[in-house]
Amino acid sequence: MASGGAITVAVIHFLFMGMCRTPWESVILLQRIIVTAFKTFVQFAIRRCTIKFPNWSLRFELLHSMISVCTESFGERMATQKHAQWIRAQSDVVGSILGWFSCCQLNRSLEAVHFNGLEHVWLHNKQRRQNKAKRLVVLYMHGGGFAVLSPRLYISLGAVLASTIEKELSKLTTEGLNVDLLLGNYRKAPEYCFPTQPEDAVTLYENYLLKHENLSPSQIILAGDSAGGGLVMSILLRLRESHPENLPLAAMLISPAVDLSGDEPDAPGCFLARGMCKAFSSAYHPSYADPSKWEDASSAQCDLHGLPPVFLQTGKLDYIFQHGARLAAKAKSDGVTNWEIDVHEDMPHVFSIFPTFVLPYAQVGVQNLATFAVKHFLTARSN
């Protein structure tokens, strides 16, 4: 009996080691999650079985409440090396398993490549043609506070996004265009801090996609969520200064983390926690308290002229909603006219990346991203 209890506690701690330091903390966190889940069901019943927000689902409300408990309880620990490494490993395994099912369902093949000492993941259409002139690429930089998560956790999203783009292209052209999506990787905080991450991202784009893969910038659209959206902005700003001829066709940002000022208002409808976000900012940019040293780590304060078209998607319930709002306002004040802003009233952080069986509305976000990508891919091919 005692050994069985010890094994159970060990398993629980194994699952929560990304945030908990001791088995006892893991047990406490599990208890909080169970209580929160119960409260969510009770509140759902009190509301006469209506969901919390119009475009949510009960599954998403439940998942959102459980994630919130974790981030509010021990979220700041995710930015420490031991916990960050554990979460990366977990997300790598979980993403590989879920991604395999998504690739089977959407007829995608997965190809892992190693470049600059890191693993990156290609997602191809299994029926793709070999004509490189008809190849279109989305380079996706994943989020996770610059510290946690693996590109493999985004295999499912990447497969859905690439498939949706191809589906929309097939409605508008008979060229038979291939859409490949590359899940880009970068060295993580706290082991590596700014500017390592944007340097890795630029190297991947210029030295791998443009030189090794022999792609033209007009064949590439950048995309990224949260911290990955911040890296996309860093890529654009650095290319504009060093090699403007290498700027990509366009860029897509999902709930981008682009402001180090750290004055976000509370957002009870979002699973991000203030302490966790501050810990990530500190790990990523040790001088984040000094605005004079922010550089492109805080692109909401940068000059945004001379960049390709940008699609900025965010939700009004997002804890870092002001990041996107300030970035859009700065672009407007800089005279930029080629940006599209996609704001969703009752959506939290990175809502588009959630599986549709949890949040059906996520497909609306993905569809909007795909529509933007298709428009610019076709415009480039007609020129």
Image: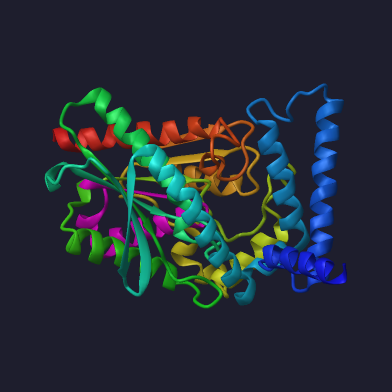
Foreground residue among 233 and 183: 183
Quadrant containing the C terminus in the rendered view? top left
Quadrant containing the N terminus in the rendered view? bottom right
Q: Is residue 352 left or right of residue 138?
A: right
State the count of labels.
Answer: 0
Residue 351 lies, in percent from the top left, at 56, 40
Query: Residue 300: in sight, yes or no?
Result: no
Residue 192 lies, in percent from the top left, at 49, 76
Residue 226 lies, in percent from the top left, at 52, 52
Q: Is residue 152 left or right of residue 134?
A: right
Q: Is residue 81 above or below residue 73?
A: below
Q: Is residue 113 above or below residue 58?
A: below
Foreground residue among 136 and 316: 136
Which SS does the magenta portion mostly show? helix
Q: Residue at x 82, y 49 (%)?
A: 34
Q: Residue at x 78, y 60 (%)?
A: 73
Q: Is residue 226 magenta?
A: yes
Query: Residue 104: in sight, yes or no?
Result: yes
For the magenta stretch, what is the residue range?
Answer: 219-248
Q: Is residue 45 left or right of residue 191?
A: right
